Amino acid sequence: MKEMKLSFDPYNLIIAGVGGQGNVLASRVVGNMLSRKGFTVTIGETFGGSQRGGSVMSHLRVSSESSFSPQIPKGRAHLVLGLEPAETIRVLAAYGNPDVLALCNLRPIHPVQVISGELDYPDLEDAKGWVKELSRKAWFLNATDTALEMGLPILGNIIMIGAMAALGELPLEREDFERAVSLTMPTDRISINLEAFDRGREMVEAA
Amino acid sequence: MSHLLTDEPGSRILLMGNEAIARGALEAGVNVAAGYPGTPSSEIIETLSKVARDRGLYVEWSANEKVAMEVAAAASFAGLRSLCVMKQNGVNVGSDFLLHLGLTGTRGGMVLVPCDDPGALSSINEGESRQFARLLELPLLEPGDFQELKDMIVWAFQLSEEIRNLVFVRSVTRLSHASGNVVLGPLPGETRKARFKHRGFILDEMEGVVASMPMEYRHRRQQEKLKQAVERFESSPFNTYTGPEHPELVVITSSACHLYSREAIHLLGVEDRVGLLKLGTTFPLPPVFMEKHLGLTDRFLVVEEVIPFLEENVKILAQELAPRIGPKTIMGKRDGRLPTVGELNPDLVVEALASLVEVPYESAPEAYVKRGQELMFFGAPNRELTFCPGCPHRASFWSIHNALELDGRDGFVCGDIGCYTLAVLPTGFSTLKTLHAMGSGTGVASGFGKLGRFGMDQPVVSVCGDSTFFHAAMPALINAIHHGSDITMVVLDNSGTAMTGFQPHPGLDVDALGHKAPAISIEDVCRSLGAQVRVCDPFDLETTQATLLELLDRAGVKVLILRQICGLSPEKKRHKKYEVAVNPEVCLGEACGCNRLCTRIFRCPGLIWDKRAGKARVDEVICTGCGVCASICPEGAIEKVENREVTG
Amino acid sequence: MRIFGPNELKADVQDKGLCVGCGACVNLCPYFKNHQGKTVMLFPCTLEKGRCHAYCPKTEVDYTELSQARWKRPYDASPLGTHDGVVMARAGEGRVEGRVQAGGTVSALTAFALREGMIEEAVLTNREGLVPVPQMVGDETGIYGCATSKYTAAPTLSEVNRAAREGIRNVGVVATPCQATALALMRENPLDREDFVDPVSLVIGLFCTWALDTRKLIPFLESRVDVSRIQWMDIPPPPAEVFVLDLGNEEIQIPLDEIRALVPRGCLLCPDMTSEWADVSVGVLEGEPEWNTLIVRTEKGRALVDKAVEAGSIVVKEMPAANLEHLRTAALNKKKRAVARAREENLLNNTDEGERAAFRMDPSVVEELTGS
């Protein structure tokens, strides 16, 4: 096992999205990648009733020492991986701080009250500005669009994981990902997932 | 092979809390596991059912929690080890049996795992199963981290066989649904043989009659067993103290709150001032262990969720010990430092603790927090819960709502627990007007349906899911039929216990082990009971509405089964039945004649409102292609084309 | 005319129990539906102005304005409204098949209009059991299937709206006074919609003192007779004062006083007995059970009647003066009762914000009708 240093211990990562978006699966993949490297990983998440179109968060605590609360304290996130723009803002507002980093998928999922006209969804340019304002550095990706080009919208999450790996904030190597997917996915899905991972990496490097 | 079967003692893997519980049961050599699905408990039985064949287990999803307890108890009576699992409400359902079981005792080890849901993250109540341990006089264990979720199960089985009675191991959502690293223990090699011995002396607990009589004798025995458990608790490895030798304050805690408390002490940097007394055996508290630690200081803060259960038990003990340890100040919920409603988190514990140790704390700079709140207001519109795209319930409630409105007699719907609970919200057109326990919709409706003699002339409808039908709605239906109540019961049959992840139930032709099982037909049951029965596809809105209107006009008990598989089911996810699109040339948008019926009222997340264009639009990522919206559009602007190929 | 939206319609008409279920608001949109004679709003609609409100004969109907638009003259509350003649009429020999009410003039005129191509379809009212249902027919057989009075308020106009949506034109409608009022409102294109097309080319109005609420009538009759045996219903002209049910082998008479309790409140606010906004209006004739009263109002109505007489489809005679006077008195009395009631309920000529009227008439006309 490689000797790895974390920039913070515990390193607090939040994956934020909307019920049904694949939040849980994304947090499992990342958690498994890090656990297999020898880190102690704690993942806290909410599903069940709150999955039905509600806001969903996975809290990941990565430590070389011990397990932590499955809920990250307010204001203590180091990195927010937002699978949806409004959710990125929501999580930054509660768990962010001036040093937090944000990686945001730009594809909106409209809440029903926006669909119905009772509430407004922010203009995307405004949303980007606000994510930037609430973070030290922010990256924006059209991960869902790329995933749609690849033929499977759910790959958007893998693109986001690939992009997160490229930030170098957490020790997430391509071979860790390869091992994680080969253990959890059917064989015929492995190569497309690896491609999505690489696309995410490229998108961040190009950004 | 499932990672749960990893047979490498000492290896460390990332497990979800519920998987850790299941692994604990495997390491304890469990033979039989039974439960009823309910968030956050479902993955325990689910995980065990997947390894049942490999480990030679019998696993079932029982018709309800009481039956699950009875099934598990039978295994214990036959000398096997058994596990019984449910969410908090399930303990209420089975508590009548537990009251007797406590008196009769168990033989093979039997562990009951209730998973509570403080804050009701996926429930409609935050009921407490801890109270049952006190009420039923049975020992209660509460794991405080992921490792303990596994280890305590093994320990609980041993304890159960020592005292020959049921042991509670209580989990909560934030442990069951969280994941953490767990060091594995060995998996046992041998299995047990089942034999129920009943020819022994009547009072022989291992070979006599398993009955709660003679009551006084059995009750006394039960209390002796509880004392025996307390003796074991005195040396339990799950009760620990960490902190200074002479702390200013000691936090007494258990369960997930242990992790919050530890974090709170760390965040405030008061490790050298504040001690942490983590209790794993919370009922009854071990008095010797407690005396030692209550003697550490004079001030205590009890950190636990919802009701002050631990706090009260500590206070009782402290009062008894007062002559030896002196008076203590025990803070927590009764003095209002911590809320008695909702779940806790590190921040709430920090807040309570910071004022006691007089250490200032801010989560993030004040200006950042303030700006965050502002931006959340503009940038993060609230996400009200909704039925999923393609959900049959949306279509069902559309028809129920419309039929009741057309009927025009101010009719209403009585409901209960399941995804369809959301019909109290606009996603179900706010159709549900009473909401209680499993099966209660039909029971309450049965009562309403008898109020005609008092002048009530409103039609009464009840809804229940297919799983709920077998769980608790059947007795209510029988009651309504027997008493000639005028109700229309709608069974929302989505072919599985959908809310909790498609666990099988008696209406399906498969069991928890994946074996073929006789499916019990809901319509046959209802017909044989004497109800007037109809079956419709809820996606056929017109027929469903017409059928409902017809049934509402009739007297007696009518049952309408609305059958359509859940939109999240694997078979539905594999195949998008229709490609759906809005023809912008035809869409009326906000004009008189439509005014956005689809987006403003029907509100499927797959259809969004393009404000700029003033037209509805399908979100191709979200839409599951059920095609129902095409039949609600008054202009025929929503077009569907059947998809022949199977995608994915 | 002040036009509001569905919320005002619901508040002013449905919630106040004034809806007579004429169907004018049904089939314009997905929100208003009629089921078993009752119009309901399924979901809230947020529009500030809607056709539902504009077409409704119970919301803010300005008789002065409507009269100006339709007749190019002010509304003066003359008992029979604008007309060009009143005669006795009945169907011509051999033209009546099946059962009709009184002289069968309505069916005969409708059939003639269809035959002559004056209309292509006729929107009539049929019944399923005791529930009145609108029906569009294109031939004589269909017409006679719908003949005989229903006495219950019927959502006939929902079928006109459906026809308009489906591009059907040149429709004739047999309408009660409230329905004829709604049709008159409708035909003015009150929302100035560019896509507006008037599908109606002929309105044959019916005389009506009041209709019965279907939802009340059904249980009322069910508690007295086996309703499946009812073959037809009749209210013979005064002074009979009974509601007659023909059960085939037996006839049952119910005193009208018992029946009046089943009249929707909205009918009590109606000032129109003779369908004043129709092309022709037809009703019973006192003392002559085999004849109808026929009022001709428009040029189109005149042409229809003249041609029908010429072709022998109907037969007409001069109306005796005494009958005409009785008719005028009855029609005027209905106006007086409606205006008095509207004023009493604060639903007449309201001007204040938020206080909306059921109808408006020139104050001088009101004065004439109330005698104050």
Image (spheres, rainbow, N blue to C red):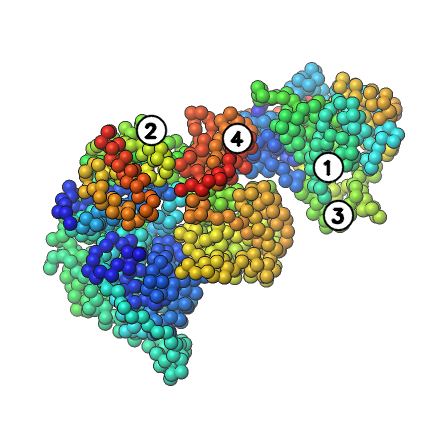
B130 lies left or right of C226: left
Mark 3 vs 1: CB contact within 8 A: no
Numbered circle sitting on residue B637: 4
Q: Is residue C318 visible?
A: yes
* Pointer 3 local density, CA inside 10 Å: few below 14, some 14–19, many at least 20: few
> Measured along the vertical axis of the image, is residue B49 above or below residue C372?
below
* Mark 1: amino acid: Asn
Quickly name the residue at label 2.
Answer: A124
Numbered circle sitting on residue C126: 1
Residue B426 drawn at (x, y percent)? 46, 41
The answer for how far apart the CA atoms under marks 3 and 1 are is 15 Å
The answer for how far apart the CA atoms under marks 2 and 3 are is 65 Å
* Mark 4: amino acid: Ala
Q: Chain of mark 2?
A: A
Tag 4, which secondary structure? loop
Instruction: Say how many tags the image has.
Output: 4
Q: Chain of mark 1?
A: C
Mark 4 vs 3: CB contact within 8 A: no
Quickly name the residue at label 3.
Answer: C228
Residue B126 drawn at (x, y percent)? 36, 54
